[in-house]
Amino acid sequence: MTSADRAAAFEAAVLPHARAAFSLAHWLTRDAHDAEDVVQEAWLRAVKYFESFDGSDARAWFLMIVRNAFHRWNERRARADAVRAGKSSDDESDRDVAAAAASRADDPARLAERASERAQVNRAIGELPLEYREVVVLRELEGLSYKEIAAVVSIPIGTVMSRLARARERLRDRLAASGREDRDARGGGAEARS
Amino acid sequence: MNCSECRLALHAHLDGQLEVANSRVVDEHVAGCAACAEESAALRALGERLRAQAERPEPPAGFEERLRASLRAAVAAGDAASAARPVRRAAFVAFVPRRVFIPLAAAVLVLAWFAGFEAGRPGARERSLDQLVALHVRSTNPSGAIEVASSDRHTVNPWFQGRVPFGVGARDFAEQGFALLGGRVETLDGAPVAALVYRHGAHVVTVVVARSAVADSEPRWSDEAGYRLATWRAAGLERIVVSDADRAGLEAFVALLRAGS
């Protein structure tokens, strides 16, 4: 096979999954630029390992590489943060993007968004710990089967099931709580105006 | 089915991941149990809300075009690296349009950086020969040596899906004297690996397949505690053959595996 054939075969197999890859990377990094960096890194790795791909499920294969690229990115970033903070490594450096998302959510400029149900859903997913967030995104947004999720995350199917169950429990609790906050906020606002 | 079994199965049921017969059992329980019916409705509503309201971020403009450009650059860089012949390289440089050259050069740098980065990653480490021999000795133990027993690669390879994070590429070489008996999952240096078990005459041969992020390499042979080991890497996978069979036979087997993968 010539390199042009290989490139064409790769593009035909993997490019259709680039949007799913971007969405996953965005949900993991919570930033469009970082998400594109992660997908680019994964893309080059996938080119390199394309010959070892068994041809069965390109989406799960590529998403696995994207997820691994994200974890490498996250480790590098945590190390860089630790160096900047002048510390070797403490729990702060490991705290993932969810914490950042949570703090951004407290920003007064974002308070307006809270009214919307849609924002509540997106915030609730964004605040999930990474291990729960990734299974929810793969299942609910990308529609992967349990078997595919197991392959992407490199965990047994039983663990996929238990993580999904716990993730959904957290989402229900979080959405119920933000529904209450929302009603309280509206109630408080009405009192203040009157 | 009781309630706690139902709660466990409910997610898989609503996600369409249960076999029809099992789904029917869940449906029957839910039909007769108010608490589980409520749980089922709540989960269904949550799923509908997530799918309707969760954002699926769209990539920025030019995203796919940038991926295509880096694919072309990486493939061209791979050609440049593999074709050491000057004639070919001259033709290749002349062929590269200027607007592609800069991303191409960037991709070469990125690949070179990865190569350096990989040297410190798992898979680049030397495997412990003791561990590999211990793993092989488990293959010779009649109980529990094989989790999927089949000589059919269409049975063995799918079994590994979801158990190890790579395609195992198992094949039977019974006609060449190495009959595939089956395989199992093992843990080596903290990562899941596939152990394929073959029979060669009176000997058992274990082939360990692991993911490897480091450069391809030719087979390296070593001896440990009366066993022979051969290790090589190709296409992102490391393979290790362990057996007490004779070296000539094992060399033939290694050649078969390398030709097949």
Image (tube, coloured by chain):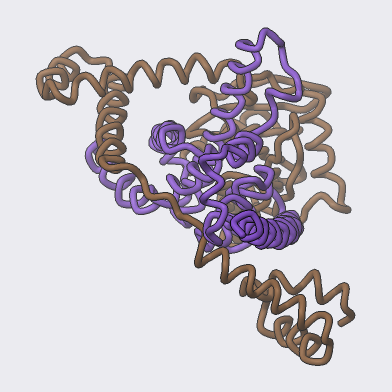
Chain colours: A purple, B brown
Which residue is depicted at the point 53% across and 43% down? A110
Q: How far from the left and from the top, in percent, is residue B109?
A: 36, 16
Q: Quadrant of residue A172?
A: bottom right
Q: How far from the left and from the top, in percent, is residue B160?
A: 64, 53
Residue B2 in view of the camera: yes
Q: Is residue B213 above or below residue A11?
A: above
Residue A11 or A39: which is nearer the viewer? Answer: A39
What quarter of the picture does the N terminus of chain B occupy? bottom right
Which residue is depicted at the point 58% across and 53% down? B172
Q: Quadrant of residue B99?
A: top left
Q: Is residue B107 above or below residue B55?
A: above
Residue A56 or B226: which is nearer the viewer? Answer: A56
B80 left or right of B243?
left
Which residue is depicted at the point 19% across and 12% down? B86
Q: How far from the left and from the top, in percent, is residue B245?
A: 72, 34
B105 left or right of B246?
left
Residue A163 or B87: which is nearer the viewer? Answer: A163
Q: How far from the left and from the top, in percent, is residue B140?
A: 83, 44
Residue B253 in view of the camera: no
Which residue is depicted at the point 69% across and 40% down? B193
Residue B131 or B166: which is nearer the viewer? Answer: B166
Q: Is residue A99 above or below residue A21?
A: above
